Image (spheres, rainbow, N blue to C red):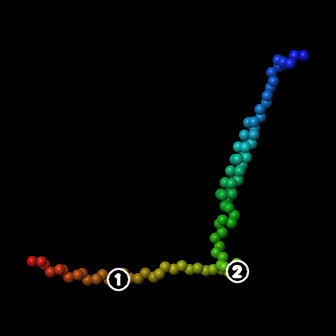
């Protein structure tokens, strides 16, 4: 038998499918992160003020601006300086 075979050898390369799996996985991860941000990250939107000590204690804060005072009356105009000669 000869050592040389005249029939062609066929090589199958399936590396294209691994790239598509990577792209689909990256897309799924991106969508999950986007949904997490758009729906609202739990715990980041708490707007409850807790007083130190007991957690059941409520705090009521009232902010008021100081009362407006009337502007001071303008001073009388100064007497004109004497004319120089």
**Left or right of residue 46, residue 15 in this image:** right
Q: Residue at x 72, y 49 (%)?
A: 28
User: Callout 1: 10 Å neighbours few (<14), some, many (20+)?
Assistant: few
What percent of the width, then of the height, locates residue 17? Answer: 75, 38
Which secondary structure lies at badge 2?
A: loop
Q: CA distance from mark 1 to mark 2?
A: 49 Å
Q: Quadrant of the C terminus?
A: bottom left
**Which residue: 41% across, 82% down?**
69
Q: Nearer the viewer, mark 1 or mark 2?
A: 2
Q: Which residue is nearer to you in this view: 84 or 80?
A: 84
**Furthest residue in direction right, as rendered:** 1
Task: Identify whether 17 is placed above or below 8.
Answer: below
Position of residue 67 in the picture relative to residue 62 (left or right): left
Q: Which residue is mark 2?
A: 54
Please, what secondary structure does the residue beneath circle 1 have? Answer: loop
Compared to 36, does 4 lie above or below?
above
Figure quadrant of residue 45? bottom right
Q: Are marks 1 and 2 in contact (CB under 8 Å)?
A: no
Image quadrant where one finds the N terminus: top right
Residue projecting furthest to the front: 3
* Label 2 environment density (alpha carbons within 10 Å; few <14, some 14–19, many ≥20): few
Q: Return the x and y of residue 66 as percentages of the image width and height.
A: 47, 81
Q: What label sits on residue 51 in the rendered view?
A: none
Q: Which residue is mark 1?
A: 72
Residue beneath the point at 86% across and 18% down: 3
Q: Which mark is first along the chain, 2 or 1? A: 2
Residue 38's x, y, as percent? 65, 57
Total count of labels: 2
Name, please, the residue furthest toward the left: 85
């Amino acid at each position: 038998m000869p050592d040389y075979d005249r029939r062609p050898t066929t090589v199958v390369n399936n590396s294209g499918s691994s790239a598509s799996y990577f792209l689909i996985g990256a897309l799924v991860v991106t969508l999950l992160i986007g949904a997490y941000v758009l729906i609202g990250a739990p715990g980041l939107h708490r707007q409850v003020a807790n007083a130190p000590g007991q957690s059941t204690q409520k705090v009521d804060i009232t902010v008021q601006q100081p009362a407006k005072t009337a502007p001071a009356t303008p001073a009388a105009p100064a007497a004109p300086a004497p004319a120089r000669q």
